[in-house]
Image: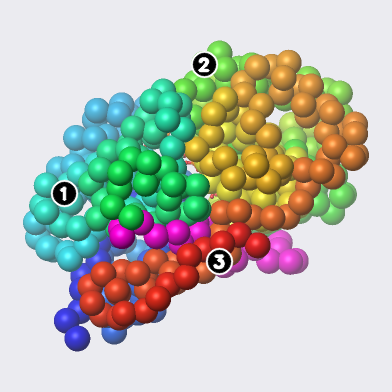
Amino acid sequence: MNRKKIAVVFGTRPDTIKMAPIILELQKNDDCFDVLTIATAQHRQMLDQVLEVFSIKPNYDLDIMAPKQTLASLTAKIITGIDEILEKEKPDMVLVQGDTSTTCIGSLAAFYRQIPVGHIEAGLRTNDRANPFPEEINRRITGCITDLHFAPTASAKKSLLLENTDPNTVFVTGNTVVDALKYSVKENYIFTVPLLNNIVKQKKKVVLVTMHRRENWGKPMEGAASAIKRLAQKFPNFAFIFPLHLNPIVREAVTPYLKDLPNVSLIEPLDYLDFVNLMAKSYLILTDSGGVQEEGPHFGVPILVLRYVTERPDAVDYGTVKLVGLDEETIYNTALQLFENEAEYKKMATAVNPYGDGLSSERTIKIIKNYFGMANEEVAEFVPR
Ligand code: UD1
Ligand code: UDP
């Protein structure tokens, strides 16, 4: 058989977590594929944490991260860096994941070299150019370029078809975020951070918080931080755990509100294993993250999403996720209601994951084999159960 060389491009925490199961599955199929891993390192420490968990050693590492980097400088470094590798390695396909600059510019670099592109987590849309920024446009650009669209859900497929995407190129695979969870969550997990073991031992109710979105920088993020401060003061026995994104802009916004509260822990980004195992033990999650919105439903942990729109509507429809926006009063009152009204809380705390079943990477690789004529196998679409 004529083996194919698949270049897998990633560079931030979330795209690497979701690409890891794809890399592992490609490696399992080494009779068909040579895997070329290309890290832009748009993130550095947060990327390295993930690479370690999944034992991935990139073939190329562009090491482009700079403090407070701009979108333009990122873009320039990614496109020239990846282009040099593509010219030298001549892969048969480039895989990108999600909606980061690495994703979008990685796909553009492949297009310029006329290499087919597979997009993992295709078709997510808010149809609002400014939210999330710049990810909504990153996804649309990637979608225009892509040859194989791996849509996580039926709703994502629908969005692609509404844009006149060729239906023969769109496949509902589920989201690999669930594959990664299955690899990582353990019943009696011991945390590497002692504070977390103590909190779990004391059976404290954990409120887990993350924030980082560009469109929330400044006042919106400060409003959310202020709501969290008031909640922490009202519920002194709850443990508020806030692993801070390494972006200094995020830290500058939230630290003044939350730094001196005894039951709020502002901590460094947790490594992926600590983070997802803490999610499993959390009482409530407040987040503006995309990936966390997809992971929470797996554990039946209610999530309040600190955004006004989401490109991940499925868990909102299932009732496990609520969009609360960034208004301080709304965040405070919605969380308060959940803390004080058990029936309301229970309504949200149902473990249905509309995003995946842990088999997404397997489906994806089968579809890639079909594409190259290495197999001719019917691949059933992912359906949530
Ligand atoms: C990026 C993605 C966003 C994704 C997010 C996940 C773009 C434009 N943004 O946003 O879609 O949701 O990652 O977290 O692609 N930093 C470090 N160390 C790290 C990582 C970041 O110091 O390991 C700091 C640096 O100062 C860096 C800044 O954070 O300049 C911003 O990083 P960047 O990748 O540009 O944007 P994010 O806000 O992380
Ligand atoms: N995550 C992590 N450590 C943390 C916070 C989050 O490993 O301290 C993981 C989380 O499990 C999820 C991903 O990072 O898989 C989400 O990344 P992020 O919120 O930075 O980006 P987004 O998903 O919003 O693009």
Image side of residue 96 versus residue 303, left or right: left
Colour scheme of this structure image?
Answer: rainbow
Residue visible at 23% across and 77% down in the picture: 373
Closer-to-camera residue (342/169): 169
**Range drawn in magenta:** 168-190
- Residue 72 x/y as whole percent: 24, 28
**Is 298 contained in the magenta span?**
no
- Residue 272 x/y as whole percent: 56, 53
Q: Is mark 2 within 8 Å of ligand 1?
A: no
Give the position of the N terminus as an image quadrant. Answer: bottom left
* Residue marked by disc 1: 111
Structural distance between the alpha carbons of marks 3 and 2: 37 Å
At label 1, the amino acid type is Phe
Give the position of the C terminus as an image quadrant. Answer: bottom right
Structural distance between the alpha carbons of marks 3 and 1: 30 Å
Q: Is mark 3 within 8 Å of ligand 2?
A: no
The image's mark for residue 204 is: none
Q: Residues within 10 Å of mark 1 (few under 14, many from 20)?
A: some
Secondary element at tag 1? helix
At label 2, the amino acid type is Gly
- The label nearer to you, 3 versus 2, is 3
* Residue marked by disc 2: 218
- The label nearer to you, 2 versus 1, is 1
Closer-to-camera residue (168/91): 168
Structural distance between the alpha carbons of marks 2 and 1: 36 Å
